[in-house]
Amino acid sequence: MRVLMLGWEFPPFISGGLGTACYGLAKALSDLGTEILFVLPKGVVDEQLDRVHVFSAPASRDSPRAHTYWTVEGLEHVRLIPVGVALAPYKTEEEYLADRRREEQARATTSSEPGKAAATPAPVLDPNRPTSVGLTGDSAMYAGDLFSEVHRYARLVAEVARLNAFDVIHAHDWMTYPAGLSVAALSGKPLVVHVHSTEFDRSGTNINQRVYDVERAGLHGARRVMCVSRLTRDLVTHRYGVPEAKCRIIYNAITINGEPMPTAMHRIEHDDKIVLFLGRITMQKGPEYFLAAAKKVLEVMDNVKFVMAGTGDMIRRMIELAAALGIGHRVTFTGFLRGDDVDRIYEMADLYVMPSVSEPFGLAPLEALKHDVPVLISKQSGVSEVLVHALKVDFWDIHEMANKIIAVLRHPPLQKTLREHGAFEVRKFSWSDAAKACMEAYREAVEGGR
């Protein structure tokens, strides 16, 4: 099976769970022998990394013209094609426009400096003149608004599709849906879309109608819709009118390398307990409920510190809220963490809390369990459907959330039981199982079943 996969985030440069999920699924599919051509915005991969190798593919019967692709060590059957667009993970239309204004100001400043030449705009691919120029340009000029960039990505993907052979198209989340629909129409190949999040998850009832329309068109234009949980499937069927028979539930997983977990040598050397929030600090993740529960915990316990790791559009408001609640001295904001820093913060934690308002799945609790940290998750998350050895609470019930936090911190036997059973349970989550379910959805799509 040859798959044209469309995404906008991939390790090592990730901003959230989508990149982690894409990597885990792509690797598992590759291990099954599936050939994947993964098209990404150029900014999410870097040819200077040790694990990334750049190749020039010669012309062949399947690919009539030479072009450049990248490979990553450990992904034997995966090729990455970077295209010159300015899409970035989790960026709203307003943030996109702000970035565009900053880029224009930087270009103007550079061109006005003595001895400095004006910056040359990045080439934009003309869809009516097939060429490889623009596919892997060094930079991507912000063009119009976010939706203009989404459609520019679609034009570039169509060019990639003309140069390569594939059996099925796999599009991740809304920014890639127009590209998937375009390639499906041009090639006659079936489209499968993967729903990791919807506009209702990100924005509640205050949705962006244009994003909703893009999502709905992609969901209805796809042969199969892969949902990361029952919660997501129900939202897709009820809010978007997608027939349930067209949907497949494929849970996310986590990579367990079989090596012993790091020891607690980096744990803090004092008596404070650490309660961790790790994720994007946005409305969807419920950070204000975490702080409200923290306030109640600190009313009865004084040896607890709360750590909020991550960034997002609500971070300033959360800093101000912590101060207003009088707990600012007990809350630490770390900013966005990567790699070893993520491992270290998990090693320090006594409890991980995910109070998400609407979480299609939620990989962070699995990461916490992998690091031997007990978890408290909202019932409004997809991962709560499959995790047994985790404490669960409605995101809005800050009293119960605080009670459960206190119980774990005050009762070591409870913490030990959650930790031991959770560490065992997390091993049942396999990307190999997810990949096999994904392959079945591909086969159904290729065979033409509705």
Image (tube, rainbow, N blue to C red):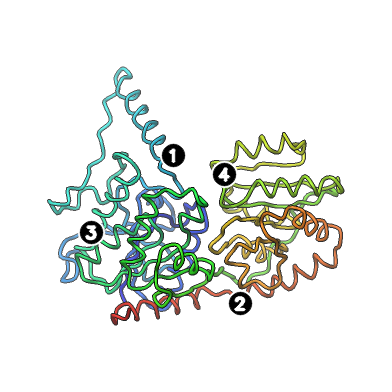
Q: Can you identify the residue that label 3 sits on?
A: 158
Q: Secondary structure at mark 1?
A: helix
Q: Quadrant of residue 258?
A: bottom right
Side of 4 where 287 appears, left or right:
right
User: Residue at image x 63%, y 68%?
Assistant: 384
Residue 428's mark?
Answer: 2
Specify the quadrant that holds the C terminus. bottom left
Residue sitting nearer the eye, 236 or 22: 236
Specify the quadrant that holds the N terminus. bottom left
Q: Given this view, does label 4 or label 1 mark the residue nearer the observer?
A: 1
Q: Secondary structure at mark 2?
A: helix
Mark 3 near mark 4, Cβ–Cβ under 8 Å? no
For marks 3 and 4, give the CA distance.
34 Å
Q: Quadrant of residue 67?
A: bottom left
User: Residue at image x 61%, y 62%?
Assistant: 380
**Residue type, numbered disc 3:** Ala
Where 270 sits versus 253, above or below? above
**Residue type, numbered disc 2:** Lys
Residue 311's mark?
Answer: 4
Residue sitting nearer the eye, 98 or 223: 223
For marks 2 and 4, give the CA distance.
30 Å
Label 3 vs 1, first from the N-terminus: 1
Q: Can you identify the residue that label 1 sits on?
A: 95
User: Residue at image x 52%, y 54%?
Assistant: 16
Q: Given this view, does label 1 or label 2 mark the residue nearer the observer?
A: 1
Residue 355, x across and y down, in percent:
65, 55
Residue 21 seen from this side: yes
Residue 337, x across and y down, in percent:
59, 48
Q: Secondary structure at mark 4?
A: loop
Q: Given this view, does label 3 or label 1 mark the residue nearer the observer?
A: 1
Residue 269 seen from this side: no
